[in-house]
Amino acid sequence: ILNVEQSPQSLHVQEGDSTNFTCSFPSSNFYALHWYRWETAKSPEALFVMTLNGDEKKKGRISATLNTKEGYSYLYIKGSQPEDSATYLCAFGRGSTLGRLYFGRGTQLTVWP
Amino acid sequence: GAGVSQSPRYKVAKRGQDVALRCDPISGHVSLFWYQQALGQGPEFLTYFQNEAQLDKSGLPSDRFFAERPEGSVSTLKIQRTQQEDSAVYLCASSPERGRIYEQYFGPGTRLTVT
């Protein structure tokens, strides 16, 4: 069983707060690391895919970093807004099982106005 | 353009019934994946198609689960003799050519409840 761990499980913040989540994954046989954002009743939306150690990606107020040698990725949200409320999933891809994604349980973020 | 669509969005089945869940991938996408998300868990891989060929079905939990993609486009996931533990959200994803296989676009899922 391949474990992808996410923490925290849930997070409640006030509008304007900055926050970050962690995803840890096996460091061997790494291929890609994805972050998805999933709002209730909608499709999971891809935020970032990262493939190289040291990758940093940014989209508006959201950014992510990747450390493949130690097996972790951080997702940062600066100045959280109520519309950021969603479940954030990370997913790990291995070189030996091409295409198959291994997901964590997600971090459920609620941003209060 | 149109994304991945799934139908039905919600399905309630009595234990022992057969169900069929449909996935319409993005037009032209070569690869198609099915994942199962049980309550409180992350999505778990079920099976993978490249065009009409089912290349990996190692995630299917039992022989009651069957998936097909006969013309390399629409896919159907069939569950026979449903059990309560089959209650989950079933997600479908598609990706473009083989070199971009990890670029997976997800549908909204079908929530199956077995009573």
Image (spheres, rainbow, N blue to C red):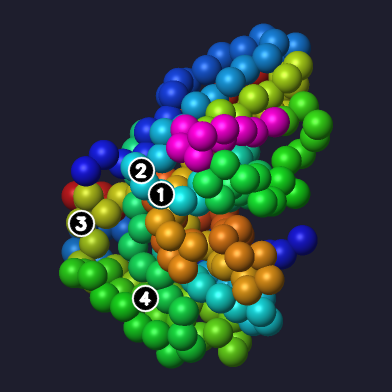
Q: Residue at x 64, y 25 (%)?
A: B78
Mark 4 in CB contact with mark 3 (< 8 angstroms) = no
What residue is drawn where x is 41% and y is 40%? B25
Looking at the picture, does residue A10 appear above or below residue A26? above
- Label 4 vs 3, first from the N-terminus: 4
* Cα gap from disc 4 to disc 2, whole angstroms: 27 Å
Q: Which mark is residue A64?
A: 4
Q: Nearer the viewer, mark 1 or mark 4?
A: 1
In the displayed structure, B27 sits above or below B21; it is below
Report x, y in % for residue A43: 37, 42
In the rendered structure, find residue A81 and report the number of the disc placed on it: 3
Q: Main secondary structure of the magenta part?
A: loop
Q: Are marks 3 and 1 in contact (CB under 8 Å)?
A: no
In the image, A12 versus A69, the foreground residue is A69
Rendered image quadrant of residue B90:
top right
Q: Chain of mark 4?
A: A
The amino acid type found where label 2 is placed reads Ile
